[in-house]
Image (cartoon, rainbow, N blue to C red):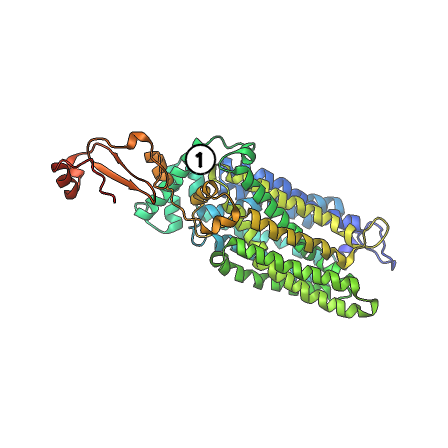
Amino acid sequence: MESFKSQFNTGYRDDHGELEISPSQTSIIVAILSAGTVAGALFAAPLGDWIGRRISIIGSICVFSFGVIFQVCADAIPMLLAGRFFAGVGVGSVSVLVPLYQSEMAPKWIRGTLVCAYQLSITFGLLAASIINLITQKMAGPAAYRIPMGLQLTWACVLCLGLIVLPETPRFLIKKGDKHAAGLALSRLRRLDITHPALVEELAEIEANHDYELALGPASYRDIFIGSPHLGRRTLTGCGLQMLQQLTGINFIMYYGTTFFTSAGVSDPFLISLVMNVINVISTIPGLFVVETWGRRKLLIVGALGMACCQLIIAIFSTVASDSQSQLVAKLLIVFVSLFVFFYAASWGPVAWVVTSEIFPLKIRAKSMSVSTASNWLLNFGIAYGTPFMVEEGTGYAALGAKVFYVWGAFCILAAIFVYGMIYETSKISLEQIDEMYERVAFAWKSKDFEPSWSFQQLRDDGFADSGIPPPEHELQASRTTTTTSESVQTIHTESSPSESQSEEDKIINELGMGNVDFSY
C-alpha cells in the first residue's frame, strides 16, 4: 500500500526512483511473524500439558492480542517487528493447540472433517483479509493499514469467548487423573447422559489406553524420538509432512502473490490475490467430504501430483516463452496458479493438520504436535525470508522469477513419494486404535487394510486382548467358564464367581461335570 510505504520507508528507492520498502526489509517484516510462530509452537506443548488445552489457547490469544496492539500503534519498522513477533508467538501456539483440542474432543467418524474445518476457517480468514486490503488500499494516511491490522482483534475475541463456553478435552482430564471431570466433559461433547453405556465405554477405553501408554515408559522429549510404539517414526512423519506442506510453495503465493503478479505483468494484483483466496475457500470444501471417504493417503498423493503438474507447466512455459509472449504467460500463470491453489486447498492444506493431530499417542501428543508444527513454521520462516532473494532481480539476488516453480514442483513430487512410504491411513478408526495399527502394520502402504482388534480396556483388565495369546495363568481352572476366541486361538480362562451369576446353560453344564470343556468351536 502507498500509505504503508510512505510511513515505513527508510529512504530506499526502486529503479524508477520511487519510495519503496527494500527486499531485505520486506523479508524481515513478513518472516518475523513466522519466527515468533516457531517459538509459540514449541511453548505450546509444556503449556498445554500443564494447564490444559483450553486455558492454553486462551492464554495464547492474549499474547496474540498484545502483538496486534503493537502493530496498530507502530509508526516505524522496529515497533512493527516487535508486534508481529508477539502475534506470531500467539499464532504458533494456537496452531498446535486448536487441532489438538479438536482431535481430542471429536468422535472418530467426523474427526477428520472437523480438523479440516480448521483449515477452512483459515481460508475464510485469508479471504476476509484480502477483501479488507482491497477496500482500504486507496485510503489516505495510516488508516489504510491500521484497519486491517486492528480487525485481527475481532477474531481473537470470538475464539476466546467460545472457549469460555466449551469444556476441557476428556483425554487431557484423564491424563491428569480427573476421571469424573472427564466424564462430565465427554457427556457435554457427546450430548449423552454420563451413565449412557456408549459414553461409559468410550471413557473407559480412553483411560485404559492412557494406562497402557504409561506402562510402556515415560513421556519426555527424548521419548518422542526413541519411544515405543514407533514414536520416532511418527515424529518423523509429522515433521516431514508439515515441512513438505510449506515446500509445496503455497505461501509463496499467499505472502508474495501481489508483488509477484505485478512483476509478471498482471494489471490488478490485489484483485487477482482476492480471486486466489476465493478459490482457496471454495476448494477446501471438497476436502471436507472426501477426507473420510477417500482417506488421508489417497487425497494427499492426488493433491501432491496435481500441484506438481501445475507448477512444472508454469515453470516450463515461463522458460520457453519469448518477451513478446509476456501477456500469454501472465494468463497461463493465473490459470495454473488457480489450479495449484485448488489442489492444495482440497488436500495438503487441511489433511496435513488432520494427520499430525491423529498419529501421536496421548502421553506425547502435545509434545510431538508442537515439534512437528514448529518444523512447519520454521520452513515457513525460511520461505518467507528467502523468497524475495530467490525471485527479485539485482545484485545478490537469484532472479528466478517464475522459474522458482521448478523448485516447488520438485518438492511436490517428493511429497507424493513421502506420503506413499510414510503416511498411515487413519480414517474411520479411533485415536486409541491408531496405536495398535502402528504396532501391527509394518509398512504404510499396507495400512488401508488394517482392521482393529485390540481393546485397551481388556488389555488392562485381563492382561491380553482377543487378538493376542493369553498368559498361562488364565488357562483351565476349576469353576465358571469364560471363553475367549480369535481367528486362530481358542482358550479358556476361568474365575470364581457366585453361582447366581451363572447362566442357566452354565449351571446345566456344571451339573453334568463338563464345566472345563471348551465348547467355543
Q: Report whether 277 appears left or right of 463.
A: right
Of 494 and 237, the residue lying toward us: 494
- Against 113, residue 78 (above or below) is above
Q: Is residue 350 visible?
A: yes
Q: Can residue 135 be seen in this view?
A: no
Q: Report whether 247 appears left or right of 116.
A: right
Quadrant in which the N terminus is drawn = bottom right
Q: What residue type is labelled 1?
A: Glu
Q: Whole-percent x and y of residue 400?
A: 79, 55
The quadrant holding residue 151 is bottom right
The quadrant holding residue 462 is top left
Q: Whole-percent x and y of residue 384?
A: 71, 49
The residue that disc 1 covers is 213
Q: Whole-percent x and y of residue 425?
A: 49, 50
Q: Whole-percent x and y of residue 327?
A: 77, 70
Tell me the element at label 1: helix
- Against 227, residue 35 (above or below) is below
x 32%, y 45%: residue: 194
Of 59 and 177, the residue lying toward us: 177
Of 455 and 470, the residue lying toward us: 470
x 56%, y 44%: residue: 96
